[in-house]
Image (cartoon, rainbow, N blue to C red):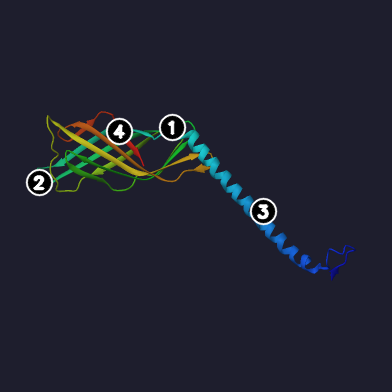
């Protein structure tokens, strides 16, 4: 079909070409509009998460060694050392929940390596909340007596795991967590205990 006009400067045109190309143009426009809408939504969510993170910026948790009891059993040739330790964890953030998992404790007492039989349980700590973690660590049989100067032995304890932050429905990626505690423990026959001490906390 041709379009006939009275204007001699315009030649007849085939209108079927325009009708056949119109549906394709509409589909292209719809796809483009949908892509723009999806991109805008993703950009808005990313911006919101970034604003929340920069505004709140969670601070790392604080740990302290509340108490540790070391028991040495055996003789000069066969020695087993058992350390029962309690750590306090404090979440200083007012708007972020701390989520801990994959927590594993290890220690050395007077140079004798100690290990935990099982990981510590996962922990969800509310904002500005406190929690107590307990760990029982033992040495292998047949070790040596813990050594120390002045009747004291040094207890070095480490807790490693993963930390996430939760703000409303948003949860951060996992961060590496390392807690190092050092305490001088008075050596006695049988068992000994240590006073509370602050720990160094590193969040990667």
Marker disc for residue 77:
2
Mark 3–mark 1 CB contact (< 8 Å): no
Q: Quadrant of the N terminus?
A: bottom right
Could you give the CA–CA distance between mark 3 and mark 1, rounded to whole angstroms?
47 Å
* Front: mark 3 or 1: 3
Tell which residue pokes out farthest to the left in this image. 76
Instruction: Work out whether mark 2 precedes mark 1 in sequence or the reverse, and give the earlier one.
Output: 2
Residue toward you, 69 or 122: 122
- The quadrant holding residue 158 is top left
- The residue at 51%/40% (across/down) is 50
Residue bearing the label numbered 1: 129
Marker disc for residue 33:
3
Secondary structure of the residue carrying tag 4 is strand
Instruction: Work out whether mark 3 precedes mark 1 in sequence or the reverse, and give the earlier one.
Output: 3
Q: Is residue 148 left or right of residue 196?
A: left
Instruction: Work out whether mark 2 precedes mark 4 in sequence or the reverse, and give the earlier one.
Output: 2
Residue bearing the label numbered 4: 199
* Front: mark 4 or 1: 4
Instruction: Work out whether mark 4 precedes mark 1 in sequence or the reverse, and give the earlier one.
Output: 1
**Label 4: how many Cα within 10 Å (few below 14, some 14–19, many 20+):** many
Q: Percent position (x, y) of residue 119?
A: 33, 47
Q: Is residue 28 left or right of residue 190?
A: right
Could you give the CA–CA distance between mark 2 and mark 1, rounded to whole angstroms?
46 Å
**Label 3: how many Cα within 10 Å (few below 14, some 14–19, many 20+):** few
Instruction: Work out whether mark 4 precedes mark 3 in sequence or the reverse, and give the earlier one.
Output: 3
């Amino acid at each position: 079909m041709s379009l006939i006009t009275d204007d001699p400067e315009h030649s007849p045109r085939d209108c079927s070409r325009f009708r056949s190309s119109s549906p394709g143009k509409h589909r292209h426009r719809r796809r483009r509009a949908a892509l723009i809408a999806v991109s805008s939504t993703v950009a808005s969510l990313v911006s919101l998460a970034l604003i929340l993170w920069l505004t709140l910026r969670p601070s790392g948790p604080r740990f302290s060694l509340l108490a540790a009891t070391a028991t040495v059993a055996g003789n000069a040739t066969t020695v087993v050392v058992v350390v029962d330790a309690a750590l306090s964890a404090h979440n200083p953030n007012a708007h972020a929940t701390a989520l801990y998992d994959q927590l594993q404790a290890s220690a050395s007492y007077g140079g004798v390596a100690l290990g935990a039989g099982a990981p510590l349980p996962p922990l969800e700590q509310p904002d500005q909340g406190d929690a107590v973690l307990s760990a029982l660590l033992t040495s292998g049989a047949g070790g040596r007596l813990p050594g120390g100067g002045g009747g004291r032995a040094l207890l070095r304890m480490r807790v490693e795991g993963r930390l996430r932050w939760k703000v409303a429905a948003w949860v951060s990626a996992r961060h590496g967590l390392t807690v190092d505690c050092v305490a001088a423990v008075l050596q006695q026959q049988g068992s000994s205990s240590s006073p509370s001490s602050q720990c160094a906390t590193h969040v990667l």
